[in-house]
Image: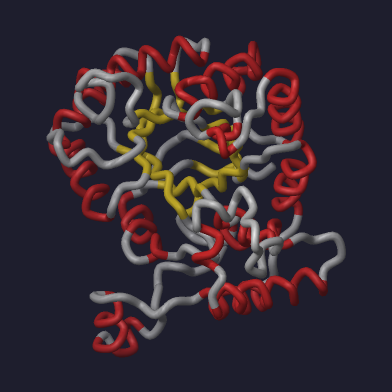
Amino acid sequence: MQTRFLGRSGLEVSVLGFGAMTFGDGQSSFATMGGTRGEDARHQVDMCLDAGVTLFDTADVYSEGLSEEILGEALGTRRKYVVLATKAFGRMGRNAHDMGLSRRHLIEACEASLKRLGTDWIDLYQVHNWDGRVPIEETMRALDDLVTAGKVRYVGCSNYGGWHLMKALAAADKTHQARFIGQQIQYSLMAREAEDELLPCGIDQGVGALIWSPLAQGFLTGKFRKERSEPTRLEQGGGIRAYQTPRGDAVLAAMDTIVAARSGVTHGQVAINWLLRRTGVSSVLIGARGAAQLAENLAAQQWQLSDAEMELLDRASQTRPRYPYSHHRIYGGERNETPFPYYARR
């Protein structure tokens, strides 16, 4: 499997990473995402390693820490051969400092994650959300201290806004601290908002993108086209229904054309393949509730969309630029003749 450097760093990650949100007991928080554990979890990790996956991502809040425990056990002695990533921010207790990005919580959360994962270090430690109550300087100092202590190798963020990301980078640069090398963001054919600021900022500042929800909560598998009297598990939260629009229909129609012309290709693979050709993307995180689904997703990196197919998907999924990007395009003339000039395809 192909690897790429994560941002402007020396950390190489596989173009497909495994997201362990589905690891849990099926009863605690994130229960609707899955309850994979034991032999099933080990089998999925084995499949990923056999396919060349080197990046494994989880978070302390996934199933209240159980995801980390299951992933650590499934990796076992092979942990040293992979890039292990986890995240902190969410509530892990009832006390005031049991969530957020304060120095106290981050250090305690890191120690707890190390224990659950059964490892001495975390390759990529990511803050899971923006915390407007804590000075960014305190957060970046705490992360830098974890790097200095050898408990963390690199740091990243997830679900930041463009100005959040730039503010964090500036704070780290000002005092020569460890800066974010990756940002874990939502991005897909149905969710292209990251093209406004996050991806351009990442390209400019050397912050690689790790993509979550590449299949738009399952909509891009092509299995959820019509309203049902009884919504499926994926439809219950309303996410799938939000994509059932004329634009969503156009995207699925474009995918239908590609799938019909290519033998053995699935809609989900098309969606993942499109992301792998977007500039600024370092790795696409895939997850699965079963081995068959995982095998299908892993196969997405074995082929590549043509330029014509990329254009077809781009046109079907494009959205009207929002202000001030619409202003840049209208009044920037030929300098900004395309809505997203940063996105030359790979």
Give the colour scheme of this rendering.
secondary structure
> Is the residue 93 above or below the residue 51 in the image?
above
Tell me how many marks there are: 0
Residue at the far front in the pictured view: 229
> Is the residue 57 above or below the residue 329 in the image?
above
Location of residue 263 (image quadrant): bottom right
Q: Nearer the viewer, residue 246 or 295?
A: 246
Q: Residue at x 64, y 53 (%)?
A: 232
Looking at the picture, how far across and down is residue 124, in whole percent? 43, 29
Instruction: Name the side, left or right, on which 65 lies relative to 329.
Output: right
Looking at the picture, how far across and down is residue 254, in whole percent? 67, 76
Instruction: Name the side, left or right, on which 70 lies relative to 256.
Output: left
Location of residue 291 (image quadrant): top right
Q: Nearer the viewer, residue 14 or 213?
A: 213
Q: Quadrant of the N terminus?
A: top right
Q: Residue at x 48, y 13 (%)?
A: 116
Instruction: Name the side, left or right, on which 178 lies relative to 214.
Output: left
Q: Residue at x 23, y 48 (%)?
A: 164
Looking at the picture, how far across and down is residue 230, in whole percent? 64, 57
Q: Quadrant of the C terminus?
A: bottom right
